[in-house]
Image (tube, helix red, strand yellow):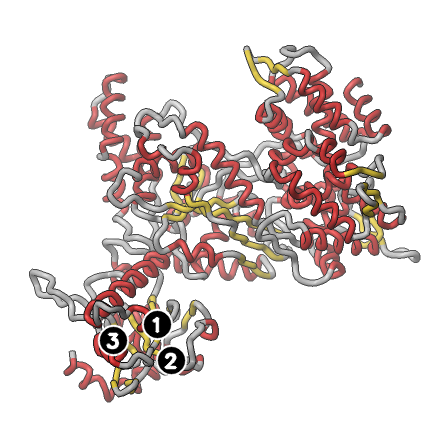
Amino acid sequence: MALARTLLAPLRSPLRRLVNAWVATRLIEPAPDALALDPNLPTLYVLPRPSLSDTLLLEALCQRHGLPPASGRRRIDGMELPACLPLPAPRRRLWRRRAAHPAPFLTALEQLAADPDADLQLVPVSVFWGRAPGKRFGFWRMLAADSWRLTGRMRRALSVLVNGRNVEVHFGAPLRLRDLLDARGPALANRKTARLLRVHFRRMRTRVLGPDLSHRRTLIEGVARSPEVRRVIEEFARSEKSSPERLERRALRYGCEIASSMTYPVLRFMDGLLRRLWNRLYDGVNVQGLARVKELAGDHTLVYVPCHRSHIDYLLLSYVLYRDGLMPPHVAAGRNLDIPLIGPLLRRGGAFFMRRSFRDKPLYAAVFNEYLHRLLARGHPLEYFIEGGRSRSGRMLTPRPGMLAMTLRSFHRSAAATSPPKLAFIPVYIGYERIIENASYQRELRGGKKRKESPLALLRVLGQLRQPFGQVTVSVGDPLLLGDYLDGLDPNWRNAPIEPKPDWLGEAVPRLGNELARRINAAAALNPVNLVALVLLATPHNALEASLMTRQLALLARLQQHCPGGLHLSLPEGEPSDWIEQVIALGMIERRTHPLGDILVAKPEQASLLVWYRNNVLHLFALAGLTAFAFRHAPQHDLDSLLHLLEPAWPVLARELFLEKETLASTLPAMLDALRQAGLVTNEETAWRRSEELEAGEQLNLLGRLMQPPLERGYLLLAILLDQPPGSQGRDDLTECSRQMAERLALLSGRDAPEFFDRNLFAGLIGSLEAEGWVWEASDRLWFDQRLREAAQRSRALFDTELRHRLQLVTRG
């Protein structure tokens, strides 16, 4: 090794210039100026293995960004050390692996032991030439994967040549060497330092490259021959009198139908393609909260659970993760997307395909479950949509149990292992200023059939790319550590038998789904379109003076600053006037000039579209809207009477909008104070009174109308349910009758909003009443008692006489 360094010494300068000219780093993390180096301490850089290309690149980067130099040797308190120290690689012989050289920190530690005032800082540096996921076979794997064990100078030279424009450099947090020195001596501290650094490098490689991938054929064959699948094959062979060999071939076909085939060339191609697509489609992709994911990525299996608003979602999230130095996940996709041209590309980008239903297909279910378990058990990041399908209404849909149940059963199965994996759910909110499915969603909400995906449909979508689509935001919520969450539900969950289904699973799945939905909503990002939609759709005719719109937008922003509806909420950049111009530029509203002041108008087709964007963030203003609605016809309330008035409606609203229903009593005083600071209400001793100023009263009315549609739906459903004796109506009959009444009300009031009478909303309302214990089902009929009548009577007091009469006329019509 020393001889090699001597021979290469004259070539280092030209090689460094060559690397500096050829190599382009696509990502340096963290930014060099954010490393928090102590300027008073000597700095040494540590690489995970000896590598001339990594060393030369690091030297060039340090020089370019003004970091302490990584070249040459440093004289530190009487000792001389290389500025860049690689951890020693294991020495190899043809037939066995020999022990590695000791770590190179012993000299420094001995000096620190002799001089109590001395110290130095180590900066671990990981360099990735390409982002190939670890895979056991393949030519691209040989050229591009940094984790390949059969390293050599020729392979490294080829990797530099192929991946020189696609290099990532990850700096670790500076490590004080003195902190690792204790009374046990420098030799032990030397081994301890090396161990800590190796753990860091292993976590970083797992975060960036993911675990090693088996060859697809090997993985599928392992799934088909697993004990779980073999058991189903044997049971099926006995019941159907079919040969096990034939069923095994069927299991292999199912595996081929399901399994992804993630490959580096496609990942790199998709990265370049999607970068161009986002630059053409959007004005920018704003990413928030990704640091929380990077903290977990090295030693947790990550399951991303984004909201599902557009076909773009999974492409966008994979692109963002790849761009920011995280391994793209394996994505669960519907089999309807496995179409010519598109399907093979998605499969090689990490998609695995699933059928919509596993019913009456036990062998398919066993193969899919085993495939999913092997991905999770090996630590591969995963992504799926807990809502099942895209939200046509723009609101968060009720989570589906399928994938969550399979994930929980896989985690339970792995919990008995010697080293059980740690799993974290990552909730992700994706917010658009404009989506490409606007027209199709409106058609489907009006009863039109969903069009089948095809390459021709893709070409039709590509024709829209010249239109403006604004910005898109990817916002990461609070991760949920599954082990800790299950411990809170049932401390003995690990001891339950795997088969049959454990008792705790039935309760855990819906509770987990609702918790993840709440965390997704809590990460919501406000943008100009949904803010304008919140205001304009609260007006009777979807028209408003531009001056009042500006003031109301400022009010919404101020309320979120004082009483945020989400833990990681973000507001758009700029001022309310800038937001209005952005929405006009996107073609979502129009400005009508007038001598007395401009008016902002949404035509019927525009208003219908704006409903979708309003529903994205309606939950953020649920408490503010409900509180303002209470002052609609009663100008004064004390805190206790207001709580008594709102308590029956809040749990139903909170369940529909995936909010914490327990927060009303604790957050209502803060909301009233925020309304006071905004000048909409006043506080007189123990009473809260609406402002007598005309402008403030109008703003309070606009705020209150945000919650009028869900309150009206609840009023209609309760009126129909309570009009008959208990046990007179079934769930489906009540849902359909309520839907028809809501449709009638929409027509009579001039609303062109199909989502107002969406059948799913009324089904969810019945579920909320059941969850509160006000309604229960027996013999396919719905039953209730006096508690529901009392709650309904209290809620009706929210409505003024005119509105109550109008709703009563609709239900009696």
- In depth, the one of 293 and 474 nearer the eye is 293
In the displayed structure, 446 sits above or below 65; it is: above
293 sits left or right of 231 in the view = right
Please, what secondary structure does the residue beneath circle 2 have? loop
Q: Quadrant of the C terminus?
A: top right
Identify residue type, mark 1: Arg
Question: What is the distance, in whole Å, between disc 3 and disc 2 at their CAs?
Answer: 15 Å
Q: N-terminal of the two: label 3 or label 2?
A: 2
* Amino acid on which the number 2 mark rests in the picture: Leu
Is residue 633 found left or right of 649 in the rendered image? Answer: right
> Which residue was labeled with disc 1?
176
Name the kind of residue labelled 3 in the image.
Answer: Leu
Residue 295 sits in quarter:
bottom left
13 lies above or below 613: below
On-image quarter of the N terminus: bottom left
Who's the residue at 71% across and 54% down the image? 557
Could you tell me which secondary element the residue under label 3 belongs to? helix
User: Circle 1 sits in a helix, a strand or a loop, which is it?
Assistant: strand
Tell me what residue is drawn at x 31 percent, y 30 percent.
498
Q: Which residue is mark 2?
A: 41
The earlier-in-sequence mark between 1 and 3 is: 3
Residue at horizontal 26 percent and vertical 48 percent from the top: 214
Residue that badge 3 annotates = 109
Q: Are marks 1 and 2 in contact (CB under 8 Å)?
A: yes
Circle 3 packing at 10 Å, graded few (<14), some (14-19), many (20+), is: many
**Label 1: how many residues lie within 10 Å, few (<14), some (14-19) or many (20+)?**
some
